[in-house]
Image: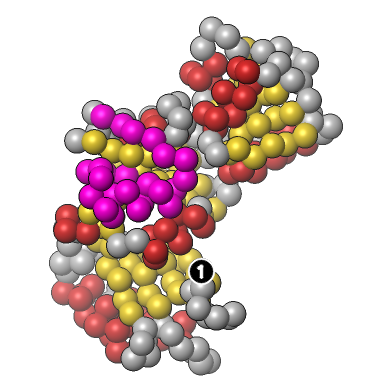
Amino acid sequence: MHAVTLGPAGTYSHRAARSVADQVSFRESVASIVEAVAAGEFDRGVIAIENSIDGSVTESLDSLVEYEVAVVREVVTPVRHALIAQSGEFDVVASHSKALAQCRDFLGAEYPEARLEAVASTARGVERAREDPTVAAIGHPDNAGDELQVLAADIQDTDSNATRFFVVAPLAERSEAGGKSTVIVYPSTDYPGLLLELLEAFADRDINLSRIESRPSGTRLGDYLFHIDFEAGLYEERTKAALEEVEGIVAADGWVRRLGSYDVEHVV
């Protein structure tokens, strides 16, 4: 199986992707990963969807709207950030914007004068540190190799730091079996009590919502769609009834997209 994920080699996405496929290729953006899977160029794509400290990855959410793919697995991996550099003398800390945010307290306390530079991935930040002695990186300590030093380990703001990844596949591989499911709901309307009605469709059937996230639809200001994860399979009668009710609530030009059902895997 051939998977694609955020590169270069050594990212946390790469660590998650190695649990999915023997062969892993890389792209520089989440959108290009999802687009490539939707086009059938790869068997699987691995994208970060949510971090326990910094919240949802909006680029991933928006890409799941733009391109039609299936979610076939969830991979959860702990995040253990380290400060990596050629020496303790540096002016810039480079890493993915999410990693910088996850280490905000440490950086503010220990290196308040360092300039923070957001790059495409944690591994790209390590490359910057390897090329430039004035740059430090935040990434997994294994990425230091022989050329860089681990100046500080476990610098994330909380020990419970973990990231959820979605494993996406071509739409034809969507499954209705699994312990969790993800749908996207676009009401294309707005009135008092709309969100309550949508949520009651699940609550009345004892379906637990594990995440609900609103994102702009891109159609007009103030128009939103909802990403919903819930703890039930699409094959279940209660799920079918809930989604049928939701489809009855949305306007004529609204829609409900079923991304699929899946199980969760924890990868260290």
- Residue 181 versus residue 11: which sits nearer the camera? 11
**Residue occupying image coordinates x 52% and y 28%:** 123
Residue 23 image position (x, y, % from top left): 26, 29
Relative to 149, is 262 above or below? below
Q: Farthest residue toward the top?
A: 146
Residue type marked 1: Arg
Q: Is residue 226 magenta?
A: no
Query: Which residue lies at the image location 30% right of the left edge and 62% below the top edge?
Result: 68
Residue 161 can be seen in this image: yes
Q: Quadrant of residue 181?
A: bottom left
Quadrant in the picture for residue 115: top right
Colour pattern: secondary structure
- Give the x, y percent position of residue 120: 55, 39
Question: Mark 1: few, some, or many residues within 10 Å (few <14, many ≥20)?
Answer: some
Q: Along the horizontal axis of the image, is 193 left or right of 103?
A: left
- Asked if residue 45 lies left or right of residue 109, the reply is left
Q: Which residues are magenta?
A: 23-45
In terms of depth relative to the viewer, which is nearer, 259 or 25? Answer: 25
Residue 223 lies, in percent from the top left, at 52, 80
39 in magenta: yes
Which residue is identified by label 1? 215
Q: Is residue 255 above or below residue 10?
A: below
Check disc 1 and report its element: helix, strand or loop. Answer: strand
Q: Is residue 152 visible?
A: no
Q: Going 21% across and 63% down the picture, which residue do you hit? A: 233
Q: How many marks?
A: 1
- What residue is shown at x 27% (from left), y 68% (from top)? 258
Residue 49: horizontal and vertical position, in percent?
44, 51
Q: Which quadrant, please, contains the C terminus?
A: top left
Looking at the rendered image, the quarter that the N terminus falls into is top left
